[in-house]
Image: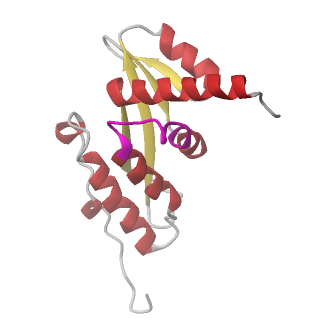
Amino acid sequence: MNASAVGKIGVEVDHAYLAGLIDGDGCIMATIERHKEKKFGFRVRVEVKITQKESELLKLLQSFYGIGVVRKNRTTFDWIIRDKTHVNEILNLIGPHTKAKSKQVEIARQILGLSDSSKNGLIKMARLADTLSKFNVRSKNRRLNYASMIKIPVSSND
């Protein structure tokens, strides 16, 4: 579908607005999780989240972009995007517009571009997840997210 210049400019404004929301009230995280179906028993999941006191804006964003889920916490609401394809789409949309989180976008894209099908790929992803977690002040005390938690037995043939 071809959009007119006016339509394209309007959409760019929406993406810039989203980038500003993520810069101010959002976070870009990567977590190392145990996963039975993965070759080495772990995966690295990238997540984008925006937190607000009211749910209306988050529901509007979810509807506009057609992805993610809005969840209620104790006192706030989160729009959470975890699907790898959707996270990648959002990062590509906000990348040119983000100011405060441009480094996090870059690291998250690197993680998404790697494969966990090899030992080296998984370790590289986990180390990048560690790097990304250092940007998120709140997650420092909540979740231990270390590449060292992945202990992969190495055979002499590897």
Q: Which residues are magenta?
A: 90-102
Residue 58: x %, y % from top left: 49, 16
Residue at 28%, 54% (x, y): give it: 130
Q: Is any atom of residue 66 visible in this view?
A: no
6, 157: nearer the viewer: 6
Instruction: Locate the N terminus and report the quarter of the image it occupies.
Output: top right
Residue at 72%, 28% (x, y): give it: 5
Residue 66: x %, y % from top left: 65, 26
* Vertical order, 114 against 76 (above or below): below
Residue at 60%, 45% (x, y): give it: 85
Residue 104: x %, y % from top left: 36, 46
- Residue farthest along the left direction in this orientation: 141
Residue 38 highlighted magenta (yes or no) = no
50, 158: nearer the viewer: 50
Q: Is residue 28 left or right of residue 141?
A: right
Q: How many marks?
A: 0
Residue at 41%, 24% (x, y): give it: 21
Q: Is any atom of residue 81 visible in this view?
A: yes
- Residue farthest along the bottom direction in this orientation: 156
Residue 97 highlighted magenta (yes or no) = yes
